[in-house]
Image (cartoon, helix red, strand yellow):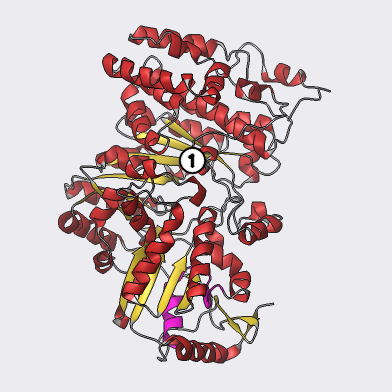
Amino acid sequence: MTQTIIGNEQLAESCRSLVSKYGLNDRIALIQLPQFMMGSFNVSIARNNGYYVFPPAGLMYLSEAIKHRNLNVRIIDVNLLLLKRAHTEDVSATFFLDILKEELDAFNPSVVGVSCMYDTGIQSLMATLDFLKAENKRIVISGGMIPSFEYQRFLQKELCHFVIRGEGENKLNMLLDFLYGKETKGPALQDVFYKYQDKVLETEGEHDHNSFVDTDMIGSYKLINLRDYQEAGSLNPFSRMAGLKDKLFMTIQRNRGCRASCSFCSVRVFMGPTVRTRPIHLVLKEMEYLITHEGVSHFEWLDDDLLYDKDEFKFMLREIIARGWKITWSAYNGLIVAFIDEELLDLLERSGCIGFKLGIESGNVEMLKKIRKPGTIDIYKKVAKWYPKYPKIFVGGNFMLGFPKEKFRQMLDTLRLYIDLRLDWASFLIVQKIRGASAFEEFKEYFTSQIESKGAITKNFIPTRGVTNGKLDEEENIRKGPDVFNINPESECSEAQIKEIWFAFNLTGNFIFHKNLMPGGTPRKFISWIEVAQIGYPINPYMQIFLALAYVLEGQVEHAKEIHQITQKVVEKDAYWQERFDSFYLGSLLENFPTTKQGVYKSLEEIQKCYEQYLPFKEKETEEEWRSRWENAGAMV
């Protein structure tokens, strides 16, 4: 049981003991861990810049918060360093520990900070903490989402000396005051945990939900080389669409926190219930520095709630337009649809926005209420009517499958809504159990198993991203291919079945029925997205064959034929892909590849006819009639 000690005397004593044991110099290392699941690492993908290489924004905020101490702070981004090494050497994912050792030996810090936000990073986090424990040379501070919820386990097992729960800027400052024996200038704060005489204790003080640095971040850019990030990877498909070779990218943030309280998310638990906004003039000052001094021309917003205080955001967009900055920007995290209006869309396009995601999650009315999503089907459809007026913007949506107790008919509503909204893309994601999210309060045993297995059982929200070959595991007693649409609508599906549902929804919604491959569509948008998305899935043949169709629609027939021939060879040599192509009625595209625009439309129409027997593609049979077929039926889940 955690105990709070009045006055923090035990913290002071613990700090003195650690300093006596390890010594204390003026060097602090902040470590950014790999941003991919360890078991899925592929050197070929790394060499094509297919992995995410986000600059360490969180660590940069920490460094900015402690800059007044005149300490020698270094950010060791092992994710970046591993990806750079992979461009010239055949390295494995675990080689990041060798890199970390090299960097620590050269810098020799007495204090090391390690953070991990998401479950996909558990393996690298545990491996790093095990390494630092075995090294036994330094004072180790851990933070981020995972340590915030696992502080008891981490401290009892002596994987680190301190855990900072939640946002860290002010709490790190307080802890450094104790370590360096200085008088604390700020208030005493809770949420710093440490082990004292075999008990895990928490500091005594106030709650802190005001850590967001109220300054520009210009000084922190001296700690990183942005050009390295451009050369080693990308932020997401939007940054690739902006042009990896020509455009230097950087992340930017104006808000921290989110006003929504979605049950599947733990942002409010980790960051507090309020949204804090940096002053607009400081955000613009930071952007101006990055544009004029660093050469940045593409920005990615990190905000969970970018449209908070929409009027101020519109003011900032008008300033960007007035200053004539030749930039592009995107918002991959997802905008809250309810706060979008036509004036905003106009400002987005004129200020350089090339794309954003929408946080839609479900197309089922019951499920939207259950997960407390701030949106309705009517709002989604109303706003969707405006998107065609702004063709320069790529509009994608985030859709989630497999909520606790979700029935298959509710998942079908999600696919149907995506098709109705006619967005440029749907990111179908399998719901992942998140610590702190109210929807997963009963899954404590699962979270324990994640840590005990050191992340081995952790799964990716995109099934094919968690493996190196891009294939789903073949399992028996589940429906596959279009047969998933015959699942009993009242079924609550197994994990293995949800993976097959994900595959079917993605293939049918994003390819077979994609609006930009049909008459009146914009094939260039499809090409721009798939060309950059497939970098992370280099051996996926259905992405390739539909890309070839889009090139035919664009009039680039010879290039389309080349892609078709490559795809044909891949499928002919692989029984897995042969089965997938046959089951989804795609074989005709390989055997009789269309080379005219009308040929493409006709080929897709013929494939689409094969799905008329299934909801949500069926038009003649009503949903009530379709459901009635399942009464008293012992359908396979």
Count of numbered marks:
1
What percent of the width, then of the height, locates residue 51?
A: 39, 46
Taking 563 as reference, is 222 left or right?
A: left
Which residue is rendered at x = 49% and y = 84% of the image? 188
Camera-nearest residue between 464 and 438: 464
Which residue is rendered at x = 66% and y = 39% of the image? 495
Taking 563 as reference, is 114 left or right?
A: right
Camera-nearest residue between 373 and 303: 303
Camera-nearest residue between 330 and 481: 481
What percent of the width, then of the height, locates residue 76?
A: 35, 65
Stretch of the chain drawn in magenta: 159-178
Camera-nearest residue between 563 and 447: 563
Vertical relation: 312 (above or below) 58: above
What percent of the width, then of the height, locates residue 182?
A: 40, 91
Taking 634 as reference, is 229 left or right?
A: left
Query: Picture quarter containing residue 98?
Result: bottom left
Q: Is residue 166 magenta?
A: yes
Q: Is residue 400 magenta?
A: no
Q: Amino acid at mark 1?
A: Thr
Characterize the local packing of mark 1: few (<14), some (14-19) or many (20 or more) Cα atoms within 10 angstroms.
some
Which residue is label 1 attached to?
Answer: 468
